[in-house]
Amino acid sequence: MSPLAFRVLGPLQVHGPDGPLRLPPGRQEVILAALLLETNRVVSTNHLVDLIWEDNPPETARTQVQICVSRLRKLLAGADGEVSITTRPPGYVLHTDAANVDAALFTSLVLRARRLRDQGELGQAVELLRNAVTLWQGDCLSGLDSGPLANKARQLNEERLNAVELRIQLELELGRYDGLVGELQRLTHEHPLREKLRGQLIQALYWSGRQAEALEAFRTARRFLAEELGLEPSRELRELEAAILAGRLPAPAGAVPVRTPGEKAPHEEPARPAGVKAEEETDAAAPTATPSAESVRQDAVPHQLPAAVADFVTDAGRIAALEEALTGRPGRTTVGLAAITGKPGTGKSTLAVHVAHMLSETGFPDGQLYCDLRGTTGTPATPEEVLGRFLRALGIPGQLIPESLDERAEMYRTRLASRRVLVVLDDAAGEGQVLPLLPGSRGCAVLVTGRARLTALPGAHRVELDVLAEDQALELLSRIVGRERVAGEAAAAEALVRTVGRLPLALRIVAARLAARPHWTLASMVQRLANERHRLDELTHGEMTMRASLSLTYEGLAPEDRRLLRLLSMAQAPTLPSWLAGALLDDRRPFPSDLMEPLVDVQMLDVAGVERTGGFRYRFHEIIRVYAREQLAAEHTPETRQEALARMAGGWMHLAQKAHRTVYGGDFTVLHGDAPRWEPPASYSDEVLADPLAWLDAEQASLCGMVEHTADAGLHDLSWDLATSLVTLFEVRGHYDLWEQTHLSALAAVRKAGNLRGTAAIRASLGSLYMSRNQFDTARQALNSALDVFQALDEPMGEALCRRDMALIARTSGDDTSALELYRRSLADFDRAGDVVGRAIVLTQSAHIRMRQGEIEAAQSQLDEALDIYEGVGYTGGRARTLRRVGQLLLEQGRSDLAVLTFTEVLELCRDSGDVIGEGHLLRDLGHAFAVMGRPDRARDFYDRAVTAREGVMDFGGGALARLDLARLLDAEPGRSRELLVPAVEVFRERRMGRELAEAERLLATGS
């Protein structure tokens, strides 16, 4: 028999002679699972493509499948198993003995058991069925993310239950009644809709002499089916009840309550097929990840949960059930998953956040991730977007986050593999939005909220919220209005909660009005609501009733407050800064939050948090936002809406432009349009922009949303200007996906408007993006297109930016001559535009070429000038990049001590700014410096730290270079060198780094 054993009846696993084999998560898992489910049968390539990409495969899909199959072949061949994957048109076949695959073995055992049953060998059939069921370790392919495979898994799960039911039926026929009761009680609890199991429980109880309990089991089944499905029990169950009542349920004729030869006693463990280890053995063999010292900072614990609501009210049993579903029982093999659904206004998000905070420290010490999926908006968050956010929160720099959904999901699951993290996904549009965001680790859990029922989430515990119970509604009213006030009008309080239908949102709105008006009685509020009887009676019937109840509060607002509510509904930001009120109303008062507070008083707005200025941020409930937008359309002309939107966008533009100025020391290295700005209070701008990158980070969603909003509304000048200004954030943080998304939206708007300058600016910025992604041909096309327009418009700043980036492409390609000429012309363009920071960037980049060519004095002169410029304008990021080149120049000059001091200074700058990529570069530079100084111990230390730092954020290319440096240093230690070089060779080969690959292979050969 082959030493390899495959498991699909539970999590996908491969066991070899030395223990479990590690399968790369993602596509290879899906392909192997598909081949195993069809062992020794052809699986077409088209089917494998559909399993991985479903409805939207890339053009390279078949090639990627071929690569995955090739890697699987290497993995299985390396395990010395009698297993092979061969190509057989139209796809592939996995060849192995069927006994090595638990699913095939399960099917074989069940078929043999059925034959033995037909031959009257009931005891032997029971034994085989027991052996078959022990092969299962959870739901089939649990934790594997593939919708089409899930259908096959569900089929196998059903066959498992069929086998259990068959085995129990045979045992009943053998007269083993007493021993089956406990098992059947558990099974009917786990599978309450399977009437066959309920019938078997009734029979086992009756034949064990427990007639009353048998009848109660039938009544329990009847109540459950009636309440859940509105159905009567099946004819078979009803006939069982009638037979028991009539005393006409004889025991099976062949019942012999003794063990057959070879049958195991109850305490004995059933036989286990060869090659399959017990679950305890598997767990014991599983490796435990230990974080290294260098990765501690990258593994900072995320705490993304929004604040919990203080006056939260719910059912304790519901909380306990959610806690159990998320934290799980010992031995759970799948990720904990719970879904909270219900009508608008029932408190789904509030319950989710409350439970998440309750479990955050004890159940999930490694952090909590949170995202509003915007499922009820017109622009739901994409899984790619959410995974990008989560990976950054987990310490992965933006530059290293892959483009495709599959690769992001693989990196996400890898990052969470050894952690206990709770993921809260709020307002999901549907299962397709959620499934890519599920971790693979059983130590993690996911809590989802949404209006859809989300019934296709595998293994999820579901909670569907409805209106509050009367005692809960009264408790909520007491917490908001005051206990004494409610106790003083107990009857009126009960009438009030009944009148609003016990809907949490409606009750909060009414209670807020009472709290704001202490001279009103509860009875007077009941009377007011009674005047709108036809509307409030509909309060528990969906959106139309919500509109009716909201109109009570809306009509009670002052005219200016109503106008602000309507205009605020245009804002697409998740939370709203107070200055927006001033911009929308064109009101320049110093404290614009005063405009918002009347809406907070009646809970048409919520306070979402406090800014560093001390001012508040606000948030709409989505239903209120929808209501306000309807009023906006009814009350305002398109012209007034456009004017208000332009002022709001102008405010964001003013702040973004000021943030850029603060970072660069002025309006450098960026083009601006002529659209008017709207200036928030100066004190507010100065305080929030004291740390401009932090502000850009915090307002990222709002700023990106405004780019798209203005593009859709035809405000093309604002759209492109804001998009290019945000490159300050995108470039530093590596938000390449947002860079592209915003720019493509703005590009469509400027093209439609015939805005040549804006079109060129966006194309030039996209050229920089493509260059950052190493897409040099695409970048060159975009830059040439933009340069032609800028030359026609005589726009020196645009020409300078294009030529600078084209020079960088030439330099990267090894064409130093062309690069220097482009840098020369770019320098002249920046001088024409009066952009000194642009000049400094060009000087720093071209100095690297001068250094490479041995022109030390010229390089030194350029770097000195660049440093003077950066220090003059206060641009810290530019100074850090130039100082690194200075350190490299000092090393070339033999001034190693000064080089170490310089690299150390830049390393601190990188750490202060959170630049983990830069930190990895500087650790490697320090390793070079100490190697040159003849201090191998210090060099080894820094190279080791560079490897850890780069690979800790999954920058395996940078890690491989540091491994090569370290191997050069350790050529006297062949064992350690080989350990370093083997993974580096794989990376160099995969990335086609020919020079590095040749050197690594040479070192391997000499070390062997």
Image (cartoon, grey):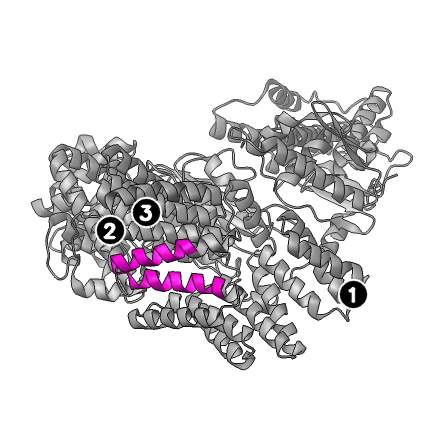
Q: Nearer the viewer, mark 1 or mark 2?
A: 2
Report x, y in % for residue 205. 69, 33
Q: Residue furthest left?
A: 559
Q: Which residues are magenta?
A: 821-850
Amino acid on which disc 2 is placed: His
Image quarter of residue 418:
bottom right
Q: Label for residue 672? A: 2
Q: Nearer the viewer's eye, disc 1 or disc 3?
A: 1
Name the element at disc 2. loop
Q: Residue at x 61, y 42 (%)?
A: 26
Amino acid carrying label 1: it is Gly
- Where is residue 731 drawn, in percent x and y? 40, 55
In the image, residue 826 lies in the stretch drawn in magenta: yes
Q: Is residue 944 left or right of residue 515?
A: right
Q: Is the residue marked by circle 2 packed among few (<14), some (14-19), or many (20+) residues within 10 Å?
A: some
Question: Is 317 on the left-hand or right-hand side of 282?
Answer: left
In the displayed structure image, the side of residue 614 where residue 211 appears, left or right: right
Q: Residues within 10 Å of mark 1 (few under 14, many from 20)?
A: few
> What residue sits right under mark 1 in the picture?
975
Q: Are marks 2 and 3 in contact (CB under 8 Å)?
A: no
**Disc nearer the start of the sequence (1/3):** 3
Q: Main secondary structure of the magenta part?
A: helix
Query: Which residue carries the number 3 mark?
Result: 704
Q: Residue at x 57, y 68 (%)?
A: 924
